[in-house]
Image (spheres, rainbow, N blue to C red):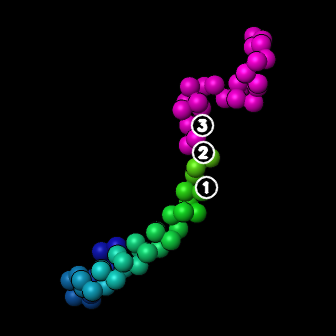
Amino acid sequence: MLAYAMRHDGHIDPKITLARYMFNMALCESFYPALQRVTAPMDRFQSVRAAGLTPFLNRPVWEPKTP
């Protein structure tokens, strides 16, 4: 982000830096609910997937487990 704010003499223009920072923050805050809606189903079964129990997820609890 600092490379965008460089002037031609090599110094950093603080106005461009602040404007880009505020623009990026507004962009991230506007996209966050949609991003959370996408990632929420993924991390719900993250621990189950890490435990290796995904074959048992679609099976009912009362059904006997056949080896």
Say what amino acid the circle numbered 1 marks: Val
Packing grade of label 1 (10 A; few <14, some 14-19, many >=20) is: few
Say what amino acid the circle numbered 2 marks: Met
Q: Residue 42: which disc?
A: 2
Q: Position of residue 66 (x, y in %)?
A: 78, 11
Q: Residue 38: which disc?
A: 1
Q: Residue furthest bottom?
A: 8
Q: Which residue is mark 3?
A: 45
Helix, strand or loop at mark 2: helix
Give the camera-side residue of 27 and 12: 27
Residue 7 appearing in the image: yes
Q: Residue furthest top?
A: 67
Residue 2: which quarter of the image? bottom left
Residue contact at pointers 3 and 2, CB within 8 angstroms: yes
Give the camera-side residue of 54 and 17: 54
Residue contact at pointers 3 and 1, CB within 8 angstroms: no
Residue at 58 percent of width and 41 percent of height? 44
Range covered by the magenta-colored residues: 42-67
Q: Earlier in the sequence, mark 3 or mark 1?
A: 1
Q: Position of residue 61 (x, y in %)?
A: 73, 21
Residue at 51 percent of width and 63 percent of height? 32
Residue 27 inside the magenta-drawn segment: no
Residue at 61 percent of width and 55 percent of height? 38
Packing grade of label 2 (10 A; few <14, some 14-19, many >=20) is: few
Q: In what quadrant of the picture does the N terminus appear?
A: bottom left
Packing grade of label 3 (10 A; few <14, some 14-19, many >=20) is: some
In the shown orientation, is residue 18 left or right of residue 40?
Answer: left
Residue 45: which quarter of the image? top right
Helix, strand or loop at mark 3: loop
Residue 50 inside the magenta-drawn segment: yes
